[in-house]
Image: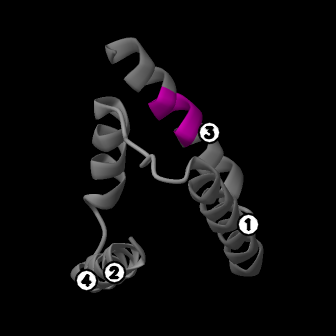
Amino acid sequence: MLLRLAYLTVTNAFAALRLLPVGDRDKDAEILALRHQITILERQLGANRVTFAPEDRALLAALLAPLPRQVLRRLRLLVDRTLSCAGTAT
């Protein structure tokens, strides 16, 4: 598990370095494409929910730690809205 966390950290660090010279518009397009892919995968899963492994949660926590409060508040509102929409659909 620790080896996988180290591997994910290194690969994500290289991915982040690759995005440094890229403009904001390109980053936004890539984010929208990834969100669309996640939506399609969730639709294909049906009733099954996506679960995160502990090392995935640790990586997400490390990435979210330095974010300012305003960004975290917007993210929390987005998650709450998504969960409330998912709750009404079932």
> Where is residue 73 drawn, in percent x and y?
25, 83
Which residue in the structure is indicated by mark 1? 33
| Residue 53 part of the magenta segment | no
Which residue in the structure is indicated by mark 3? 14
Which stretch did the figure color magenta? 8-12
Structural crowding at the residue carrying mark 1, measured as other residues with C-alpha within 10 Å and reported as few (<14), some (14–19) or many (≥20): few
Q: Main secondary structure of the magenta part?
A: helix
Q: Quadrant of residue 2?
A: top left
Q: Are marks 2 and 4 in contact (CB under 8 Å)?
A: yes
Nearest-to-viewer mark from 4 and 3: 4
Nearest-to-viewer mark from 2 and 1: 1
| Residue 11 part of the magenta segment | yes
Amino acid type of the residue that numbered disc 1 sits on in the rendered structure = Ala
Amino acid type of the residue that numbered disc 4 sits on in the rendered structure = Arg
Which circle's residue, 1 or 3, is located before the other in the chain?
3
C-alpha distance separating marks 1 and 3:
20 Å
Which residue in the structure is indicated by mark 4? 73
Residue 84: image tag: none
Closer-to-camera residue (56/63) = 56
- The residue at the point 31 percent across, 59 percent down is 64
> Where is residue 54 drawn, in percent x and y?
28, 32
Query: Image check: 35 left or right of 82?
Result: right
- The residue at the point 36 percent across, 53 percent down is 63
> Where is residue 49 drawn, in percent x and y?
42, 49
Residue 71: image tag: 2
Nearest-to-viewer mark from 2 and 3: 2
Structural crowding at the residue carrying mark 3, measured as other residues with C-alpha within 10 Å and reported as few (<14), some (14–19) or many (≥20): few
Q: Quadrant of residue 34?
A: bottom right
C-alpha distance separating marks 2 and 4:
5 Å
Which circle's residue, 2 or 3, is located before the other in the chain?
3
Which circle's residue, 4 or 3, is located before the other in the chain?
3
